[in-house]
Image (spheres, rainbow, N blue to C red):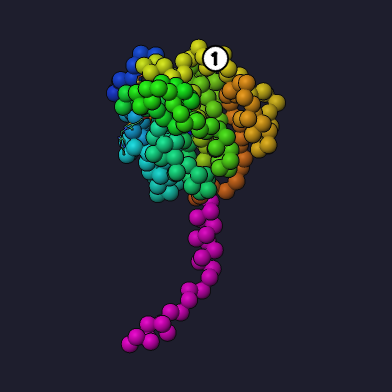
């Protein structure tokens, strides 16, 4: 992080967002650029790997290095960037279809690595870009273009999954609450390890979950919540009358980079095995 402070709007690229008016992704962009400004992150020192979808376009709208990857592959790309250059601040950004459908298998393995990066999932409960197919978080019975008589499959519960995977920073935000989301993103970026920020991001075009219906059930996590207590985090996530927003869980444990450096140091102290005898058998 540098001492040169940029304003939030100075993190916006010259590419103007093409999202529908009222799309939840605008709040994500506002909160994100404000968090970058809060932390004085320099554009040339950060990378966003984004997925494919309306949400995946995010990386075009931020002034930084970007990698618009293949559908569902933003997270492994981000892990690769961080492994190659641990000095960079790295992000992965994409949608619910991208991250929980085609790319869903990557999340538990990213959790096992604890790579020091922030993954933001913009969840609108639908495949927005491709015109309204059901996604892994579409509510049951909801009519979509691929479920004309209503969804028969039950939706995933991402926060419960992330806690079970052992991710070291788990948060849920609402993109119409830019102030609350800015706080969450600032803490997520500061976190040393894998941080995941799941976003309730209404799609005004397909209206699977509207901002008004979410406001009725959303409640902030109480101030006295102990973020280091996994059982308490699960209790909040298992609450079925409300949806809590805020930081559910955060622990400090070695990152992928710490583990690799430690492994390198250990491997240098061990005498290499003499394998000449094996080759000599074949001469
Ligand atoms: C391998 C592959 N399969 C399918 C697609 C088509 N496709 C593009 S975006 C998308 C879904 C996007 O949904 P989501 O990730 O939820 O993003 P949203 O548009 O809702 O923000 C699909 C199926 C693709 N581009 N690549
Ligand atoms: S279709 Fe939905 S997710 Fe895509 S830009 Fe429009 S409102 Fe946003
Ligand atoms: Mg989506």
Residue occupied by mark 1: 215
Q: Is residue 275 visible?
A: yes
Instruction: Find out whether residue 85 is within the magenta segment.
Output: no
Residue visible at 48% across and 47% down in the picture: 109
* Residue closer to the observer: 148 or 262: 148
**Compared to 82, does 27 lie above or below?**
above
The quadrant of the image that shows the C terminus is: bottom left
Q: Position of residue 7 (x, y in %)?
A: 43, 21
State how many labels appear. 1
Classify 10 Å Cα crowding around label 1: few (below 14), some (14-19), many (20 and above): some
Q: Position of residue 276 (x, y in %)?
A: 41, 82
Q: Is residue 23 visible?
A: no
Residue visible at 64% across and 34% down in the picture: 234
* Residue closer to the observer: 229 or 267: 229
Q: Secondary structure at mark 1?
A: helix
Q: Which residues are magenta?
A: 258-283
Instruction: Find out whether residue 280 is within the magenta segment.
Output: yes
């Amino acid at each position: 992080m540098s001492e040169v402070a940029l304003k939030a709007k100075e993190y916006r690229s010259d590419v103007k967002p093409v999202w529908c008016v009222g799309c939840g992704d605008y709040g994500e962009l506002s909160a994100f650029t404000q968090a970058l400004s809060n932390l004085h992150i320099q554009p040339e020192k950060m990378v966003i790997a984004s997925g494919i979808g309306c949400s995946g376009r995010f990386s075009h709208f931020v002034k930084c290095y970007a990698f618009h990857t293949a559908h569902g592959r933003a997270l492994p790309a981000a892990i690769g960037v961080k492994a190659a250059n641990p000095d960079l601040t790295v992000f992965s950004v994409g949608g619910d279809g991208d991250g929980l459908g085609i790319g869903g298998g990557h999340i538990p393995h990213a959790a096992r690595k604890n790579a020091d990066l922030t993954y933001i999932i913009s969840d609108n409960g639908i495949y927005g870009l491709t015109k309204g197919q059901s996604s892994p978080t579409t509510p049951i019975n909801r009519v979509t273009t691929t479920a004309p008589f209503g969804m028969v499959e039950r939706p995933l519960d991402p926060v419960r999954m992330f806690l079970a995977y052992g991710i070291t920073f788990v948060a849920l935000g609402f993109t119409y609450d830019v102030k609350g989301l800015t706080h969450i993103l600032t803490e997520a970026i500061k976190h040393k390890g894998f941080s995941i920020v799941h976003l309730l991001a209404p799609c005004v075009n397909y209206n699977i979950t509207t901002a008004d219906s979410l406001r009725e059930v959303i409640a902030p996590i109480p101030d006295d919540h102990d973020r280091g207590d996994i059982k308490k985090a699960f209790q909040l996530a298992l609450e079925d009358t409300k949806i809590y927003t805020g930081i559910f869980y955060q622990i400090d444990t070695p990152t992928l980079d710490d583990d690799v450096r430690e492994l390198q140091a250990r491997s240098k102290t061990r005498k290499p095995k003499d394998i000449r005898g094996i080759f000599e058998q074949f001469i």
